[in-house]
Image (spheres, rainbow, N blue to C red):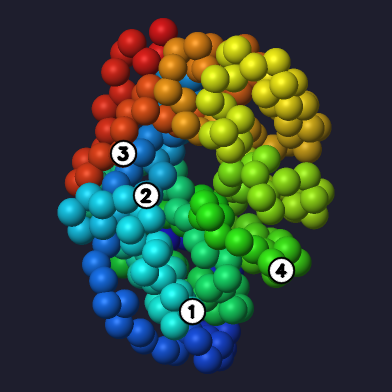
Amino acid sequence: MIPIHPSREEPSSSATGCRECKKETDLGFDFLFAYQPIVDVRTRSIYAHEALVRGPNGESAYSVLSQVTDANRYSFDQACRVEAIRGAAALGMKELLSINFLPNAVYRPEACIRSTFEAARLYDFPIEQIIFEVTEGEQVTDRPHLVNIFREYRRFGFRTAIDDFGAGYAGLGLLADYQPDIIKIDMELVRGIDSSKPKQAIVHGIVSICAALNVRVLAEGIETSAERDFLYSAGIDLMQGYLFCKPAFQAIGIIEPSSWA
């Protein structure tokens, strides 16, 4: 049994009144997960692993997400949560697990979260180790709805993250409405940042704002040691990218010692 703090109670069975939550839709396609480490450069340790959806033969995330429709969006989102937790537990993951979710698939947070609790209990994976982040490319037109989802998930004991910060909807307006545990700087800002004064100025500003709001900053898409070194000097110690490790299937990625240098 997974312990739950009294102030973070699992939603009651009466919360399952959402009509969509009772539907079961055959997805019509298969998928699996690869796990990519998120590293803490300061401590030279693995902070978390992000569950990245892939096709059954390792095809891109786009090949899977392009098959998601209004009819199967909810079922896909729920299946992803369960499979990500199952896979992490099977790998014996001890670090945090970051799961992307589709906010447009969440009708009532307190109802739609129940399968996550059930999967965590079934596979003995503590909910305190789960981070929910908004998936890349998901266009959120109802920001108050997203903010409500995040607040409910935090109330239930999950950590939260805003992905692709600095691109699209994930900007300062959302950060003003809700302060997650982590923001992930969009990789377009990361690419070549060591030689781009405008990008450096923007990232310094983000780091300063997040420090004032007690939000940790994570830089994703790190491919070169120069990018890593500049970001670390800017005050960012959480990083993710091919420099450290590519996503691994049926395994937890190994960080090469040279990646930390």
Q: Is residue 103 above or below residue 33?
A: below
Amino acid type of the residue tagged 2 in the rendering: Leu
- Name the image quarter holding residue 141: bottom right
Residue at (37%, 49%) from the top-left corner?
52
Determine the CA span between mark 4 and mark 2.
Answer: 25 Å
- Left or right of residue 167, residue 121 in this image: left
Residue at (33%, 28%) from the top-left corner?
245
- State yes or no: discs 4 and 3 in contact (Cβ < 8 Å): no
Disc marking residue 142: 4
Determine the CA span between mark 4 and mark 1.
Answer: 16 Å
Disc marking residue 247: 3
Determine the CA span between mark 2 and mark 1.
Answer: 21 Å
Q: Mark 4: few, some, or many residues within 10 Å (few <14, many ≥20)?
A: few
* Mark 4 element type: loop
Disc marking residue 90: none
- State yes or no: discs 3 and 2 in contact (Cβ < 8 Å): yes
Q: Which residue is mark 2?
A: 52
* Closer-to-camera residue (201/147): 201
Kindly report which numbered mark, 1 or 3, lies closer to the viewer in this rendering.
Answer: 1
Amino acid type of the residue tagged 1 in the rendering: Asp
Residue at (41%, 70%) from the top-left corner?
68
- Whether residue 89 is visible to the viewer of this picture, yes or no, is no
Q: What quarter of the picture does the N terminus occupy?
A: bottom left
Of label 1 and label 3, which has the lower sequence position? 1
- Name the image quarter holding residue 57: bottom left
